[in-house]
Amino acid sequence: MKLYFLRHAHAEDATGVLSDHDRKLTSKGVKAAGVVARLLHALEVEPDQIFTSPRLRAQQTAEIVATTLGLTIEVRDEVNFGFGIESVKKLIERFDDDSEVMFVGHEPTFSLTIGEITGGRVQMKKAGIARVDLLTRQPLKGELVWLIPPKVTGVLDE
């Protein structure tokens, strides 16, 4: 099974006035999400499912990618803050070993979860994407196949 972890693109700053759930992508974020979407299309990434956090910035990032790939998204609370290895297990249980699943969410939980699955240390930047191939489900273990930070795609992280 191939797992893709996409951190949401650049969003409005947290000011305390706007609810964190309602922070939307900036124009830079929309552009970055589009670049990542086109890259995934060029790499022929075709997930069977895209799960996204319910926070607006993640949903917008997921929608841009899904539109480019001709897919739809499923909003799931498990991909919100608090995402972790148990969330991954729950969300992939209905898929077979040949499936591909994408998660669109947040830090620091993405980096921590990838680290727990692979035994490595990564840092997911905004609009960064990682691919992890599962080796076993019990325990959930896999290898980091690639990590593409925004600097590689030409969308520099702040």
Image: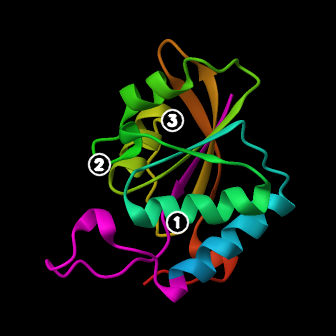
SS at mark 1 in the image: helix
Q: Is residue 20 left or right of residue 85?
A: left
Residue located 15% across and 80% down the image: 17
Q: Residues within 10 Å of mark 1 (few under 14, many from 20)?
A: many
Q: CA distance from mark 3 to mark 1?
A: 28 Å
Counting residues from the N terminus, which is met first, the one under dot 3 or under dot 2? 2
Q: Label 3 is placed on what type of residue?
A: Thr
Residue carrying label 2: 81
Q: CA distance from mark 3 to mark 2?
A: 20 Å
* Front tag of 3 and 2: 2
* Boundaries of the magenta span: 1-28
Residue carrying label 1: 60
Residue carrying label 3: 118
Disc ID at residue 114: none
SS at mark 3 in the image: helix
Number of labels in the image equals 3
